[in-house]
Amino acid sequence: MLQVGFRKILKWCIAIIFLTILAIMYRTYNPTGNIYFPKCPFRELTGLKCPGCGSQRAVHYLLNFDIYNATKENAILVLSIPYILTGLVFDLLKRPSERILKWRKRLFGQKAIIVILTIIIAFWILRNITYCQQSVAAIRVSVVIQAFCPA
Amino acid sequence: MKKYFYTDGTNNFGPFTFEELQQKNITRETKVWFQELGEWKPAGTVPELTDIFKLVPPPITKPNSNFNNMENLNNQKPPKTWLVESILVTLFCCLPFGIAGIVNASKVESRFYAGDIDGANRSSEEAKKWTTVSFWIGLAVGVIYLIVVIAGAASGF
């Protein structure tokens, strides 16, 4: 029993140290053009943005309190922060009251999950359309992009 | 000698002696009659027949399962859906695994509120698996990438 508790504390300590190092790194260095930050494999392969593209840059701007640029890099990440924090709090509550459960069902229930999935996929498609409209010449044009906005 | 009768609702059986009645596998609910009783009564309510049931446990009252469960479900917390973690995974590393996690989160919810607790728990495990797998893959890819870049930079100098 005591050992399980100890292991749990150790796990949390490692996680917190790891996150702090990451936060300092992402705050100090801008991932744009920096070879030490990993690139999105989906974008490398297809030239298209995935829903998560720009997350690293968005985190960099967020840690520097630049919400405008963070939103420009990945709007869905910035918008989801309050939702994710609420979800984490709801998950941590051991014995939620009936009112909280009702809200949990509304915000994180099956219908909500379907809405989230739709938003993510819609965001995925839309950001590639506006992206190719803005800078068709600048990117490797894939078949998908050509289908959406020729020339 | 007292003679007892019992009925299954349509047919009457008897007369029996007390000893014979004991062999008939009657239950507490079986209606019995004898002359002093006046009318048919459940055997369990007749004091002089209690000896028959001494070794028979009373019936288990089954809760009306469906209704009660639905009543309770709305006051209960469903198993962990891993939704938040799945969204984070989708945004930060492995898109396909994140989507799989979100789909399983949706299954946890729908199964739980349909009363399928076991199914909900299974989906919760499944969602946990996807999240854990993608977390470690993301971490490994990041570390390998960093090693490759540093090695490349070092050999370049």
Image (spheres, coloured by chain):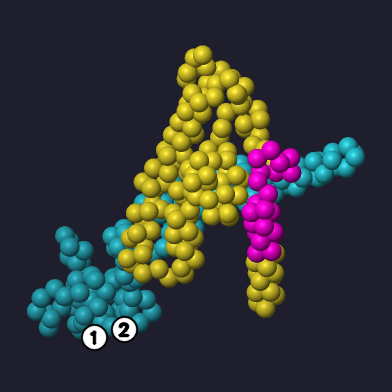
> Image height check: is A121 above or below B27?
above
**SS of the residue at dot 1?**
helix
Q: Looking at the image, can residue B125 be seen?
A: no
Name the residue at 36% across, 69% down.
A97
- The residues colored magenta run A16-37
> Image height check: is B134 above or below A42?
below
Mark 2 chain: B
Q: Quadrant of the N terminus of chain A?
A: bottom right
**SS of the residue at dot 2?**
helix
* Residue closer to the observer: A32 or B83: A32
Q: Which residue is mark 1?
A: B48
In this rendering, the count of numbered labels is 2
Name the residue at 69% across, 74% down.
A6
Residue A79 part of the magenta segment: no
Residue A135 image-quadrant placement: top right
Q: Which chain is depicted yellow? A: A
- The image shows residue B128 at horizontal and vertical percentages of 57, 52
Q: Is residue B1 left or right of residue A124?
A: left
Q: Is residue B81 left or right of residue B60?
A: right
Q: Which residue is mark 2?
A: B51
Q: Colour of chain B?
A: cyan
Name the residue at 49% across, 14% down.
A150
Gap between marks 1 and 2 measured at Cα: 7 Å
Label 1 close to label 2 by CB (< 8 Å): yes
Q: Looking at the image, can residue A24 be seen?
A: yes
Same subunit, labels 1 and 2: the answer reads: yes
Q: Is residue B53 left or right of residue A127?
A: left
Q: Amino acid at mark 2?
A: Asp
Name the residue at 40% across, 53% down.
A108
